[in-house]
Every structure is written in C-alpha cells, then in structure tokens.
Image: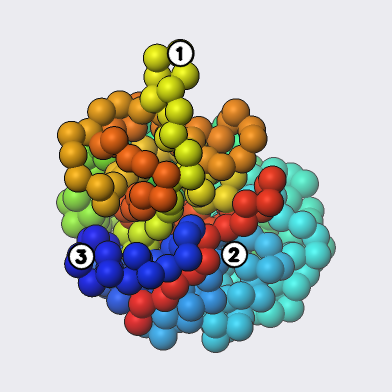
Amino acid sequence: MDLTPTILDLARKLTSPALIVDLGEVRRRYEAVRRALPGVAVYYAVKANPHPAVAGTLRELGCGFEVSSVAELELALAAGAGGPGIISGNPVKTPDFVSRAHAAGVRGFALDSPAEVAKLAKGASGTEVYARVTVDNSGSEWPLSRKYGVGPVEAVELLANARDAGLTPAGVTFHVGSQCVRAESWLDALGVCREVFERASGRGLDLTALNLGGGLPVRHTRPIPDLDAVGSAVMAYLREQFRPDLRVSVEPGRALVGEAAILVTTVIGVAERASERWVYVDAGVFNALMEATGGIRYEIVAERPGARAPCVLAGPSCDSVDVISSDALLPDVRVGDRLYVLNAGAYTLSYASSFNGFGPPEVVLLP
Ligand SMILES: Cc1ncc(COP(=O)(O)O)c(C=O)c1O
C-alpha cells in the first residue's frame, strides 16, 4: 500500500498511533495468491491480522481460514465460514479447541506428536490429520522451525498411529518460516514431503493431501522473491512429483495482509545518548511492532523532508527492549512529527499489548 497524497491527507487527521487498513489491497493480495497457485485452496492464517473486517473481506471472496484457538475459530465462523472452510495448522492444540472445532465441522488438523494423536482421536474422531514435518527455515526472517515438526520417518509413524486410532491420515504440512525470502525453501520442503508420501505408501497409507503452510513474504527493506515465480516453481514440482489428484492447500497470513496497511505514528521524544541520536515514537514493539525484535526491518517514511541520518528508533514504554531499530535512517525529526511505517498489516495488531498503558493503534478501514 503506497503512501499516496490521499492517504497522507487522511493520516494527518488521525489520532496517533493508527493503522490504516486498505481492504481493497487485501482483496488484491488474495487474488494474487490465487493466481500464483492455481487450484490450491487458500486458508487465511487469521493470526496475522484478526480484524473482523479483514476476515469478512476474505470470506466474501471465498477464502477459507486457518485457526489455532477458540477465539480464532469464532472469528472465522462469525465471518461466515462453515466448518469445511476452516483448518487448524497448530500442531499442539488445547483440548477445548479440538472439541469445539470438531463440533463446528472443521476438517483438517495438524499434529506432530503421539500426545496430539491421542487428543484428536478423543476430541475429533474420524477427522483428517496432517503430519507437520520439519523443514529448513534458514531462508526466513521470522523462523518457526524449532518449536514444531518431525522428520519423515516419525511423520509416517504418527500417521499410521492416527489411522489405528480412528483418525483419517490425509497428508503432510510444513512451514518454511514466516517472511521466507528464499524461493528454493518451498522446493526443499516439498522434497521432504515427497519422502513422507513414498514412505507412507510403503506402509499402506494412501495420502491424498498436502498443505504448503505459510511463509510467503511481503515487501519491507530487503529484496523478496516474486510471488508468481515461487508459485510456478511449486506448481511444476507438484505436477512432476506428486499424484495428479493431490488436494493442495496453503495457509498464508502475512502475504494477504502485510502490504495492506500503513502504521501512523508520532515522534514523542528526541535525545542524544552516548553520541547516538535517539528518536522515540508512540508505536513501539509492545503496542505494534513486536516483529522488530526478531529482525523484521520496516520501511519508515518521515513526513519532514531533509537528509536522512542514522538513529536509534524506540517505542514509548519504559522497557529497554522497546527498540524498533538500532540503525534507522531518518531526517532531523522533532517532537510532533509524523512517521509512517509501510506494509505494517501483519502481526502488528495481533501481537499488540497495552504494556505500560500504551494501547494498540486504532484501526481505520478503507473499503
Ligand atoms: C501453522 C501456521 N500456518 C500459517 C502461518 C502463517 O504464516 P505466514 O504469516 O508466514 O504466512 C503460521 C504463522 O505462524 C502458522 O504457524
């Protein structure tokens, strides 16, 4: 979403901090993912931005939802999705969520442990399950690998156990890591999935489905691979290496909403400390930009013109973790100046807390 004169005009009138969300851009991003991955069922990972208007907009286009908690399930149902339009990619779920999702007709749960096989067999008997495999996350700016996943041998073991426990072993799921900037990561991951399919067939398991997870990146300050190029490489690999009637799904979060919002923030302080310039703004890592702590580097535009010089950009709270960037490039900004954080639609609202009394940005929707 560009900082056009119209957006600037609107932004100037808003109380800071604010998140301007362009629902038209959400629609365009959804269509772009559909075009890049033809025939692949898209389930929006609600965690990226759980605003009901975002969910409603995607639902109108026929998008499904990936949910991990009771609150996300309720959001998807309220948006009008039926159970078959919802899946859960979280490999470790609460028992309460499992039974409520099953009762709502959710089809398709990820798992990666014997404990989860037992939990799903108890709370969601007969349901389709996907083994979450570990794949290389080195191309990701927000890696997810250590917490979840198993190797191909264990994946087949879990799927066989799931069958014996009365579940339906459907296939495999993975996550290349969020904001994945390495296009080959998806092909490497598909290689791991292919091994699971082969081993499963040797065990008499007929796997029919593959979930490509999330990870599709958005524009920040570093180059990202072209969505269509990733899509055509993935589609070619699927055609060549998997059964023709494979059911394929994808669960993007960031890619559908990241580029659909601009964060409006205001300079609340400037200081010189140990010969470094510090700039403090009213939207920091606790109330909007949590992903800055993991290395996501946002593009930040100051309204004030002038040569840009390095500074430490920090949030409003008293905590020293609240640093957005240690080497931001900004002009000689003053208290009261507005700064605009571009492409800030993903994992900003959903991570935001009111720590220290600084609340999340107010959301302003553009149709
Ligand atoms: C299971 C699962 N699916 C999908 C996503 C969405 O990932 P992304 O926003 O990188 O597309 C996540 C993110 O954490 C996830 O954990």
Q: CA distance from mark 1 to mark 3?
A: 37 Å
Question: Is residue 206 in view from this perspective?
Answer: no
Q: Is residue 227 above or below residue 58?
A: above
As helix, strand or loop, the secondary structure at mark 3 comes to loop
Relative to 194, is 154 on the left or the right? right
Looking at the image, tell me whether mark 2 or mark 3 is earlier in sequence order. Answer: 3
Looking at the image, tell me whether mark 1 or mark 3 is earlier in sequence order. Answer: 3
Outermost residue, top side:
274
Q: Position of residue 27 (x, y in %)?
A: 32, 75
Labelled disc at residue 67: 2
Say what amino acid the circle numbered 3 marks. Thr
**Residue at screen point 27% across, 51% down:** 303
Labelled disc at residue 274: 1
Question: Is residue 269 in view from this perspective?
Answer: yes
Comparing 294 with 357, the one in front is 357
Q: Position of residue 98 (x, y in %)?
A: 74, 65
**Position of the N terminus by quadrant:** bottom left
Say what amino acid the circle numbered 1 marks. Ala
Relative to 191, is 227 on the left or the right? left
Looking at the image, tell me whether mark 2 or mark 1 is earlier in sequence order. Answer: 2
Q: CA distance from mark 2 to mark 3?
A: 34 Å
Q: Position of residue 332 (x, y in %)?
A: 29, 35
